[in-house]
Image: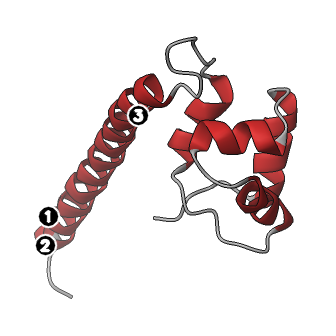
Amino acid sequence: MQDPLTPELLRDARQSAGLSQRELAARLGVRPMTVSEWELGRAEITLPASRIALALVSPPSPRDPHGLARRNMEWALSDTTVMRRHLDGMERRVRESIAALDALAALPPR
């Protein structure tokens, strides 16, 4: 499954959060040039959208100026939650497909 985060969406979200490219880069632990390249579409966005979203909304604390410890825990939880949702959706689609195949099998032969 592809990440739905586009360069334009990343730029708009960063600007809406009131962060500079340098500030977002610091929160993500990447170079400011990396954020710039992502926003210009010159480089593939290599981090999960959930991690970037957390970086946009997680304020830094005095003990953890970049919010890395908390954000990493939130990231793991968020990725697990997202993965669980995707698996639930996949399970539902598989069950629907099985039901459709059962219905087809119950039809009289032509």
Residue 45, image x, y percentages: 63, 62
Q: Is residue 34 left or right of residue 61?
A: right
Please name the residue shown 82% across and 59% down the image: 36
Q: Which residue lies furthest to the front in this view?
A: 63
In terms of depth relative to the viewer, which is nearer, 98 or 89? 89
Res 27 label: none
Q: Which amino acid does label 2 sit on?
A: Ala
Res 105 label: 2
Q: Earlier in the sequence, mark 2 or mark 3?
A: 3
Residue 26, image x, y percentages: 66, 40
The mark lying in front, picked from 2 and 3, is 3
In terms of depth relative to the viewer, which is nearer, 66 or 75? 66
SS category of the residue bearing label 3: helix
**Residue 104 higher or lower than 89, as above or below:** below
The mark lying in front, picked from 1 and 3, is 3
Task: Please state, as top left, top right, bottom left or bottom right, where the N terminus lies in the image.
Answer: bottom left
Q: What residue type is labelled 1?
A: Asp
In the rendered image, which residue does mark 3 sit on? 72
Residue 106, image x, y percentages: 12, 67
Q: Distance between the residues labelled 2 and 1?
A: 5 Å
Whether residue 52 appears in this view of the structure is no
Q: Are marks 2 and 1 in contact (CB under 8 Å)?
A: yes
SS category of the residue bearing label 1: helix
Q: Which amino acid does label 3 sit on?
A: Asn
**Residue 54 higher or lower than 43, as above or below:** above
**Residue 105 higher or lower than 96, as above or below:** below
**Residue 102 higher or lower than 65, as above or below:** below
Label 1 packing within 10 angstroms: few (<14), some (14-19), many (20+):
few
Q: How far apart are marks 2 and 3 (CA)?
A: 49 Å
Q: How far apart are marks 1 and 3 (CA)?
A: 44 Å
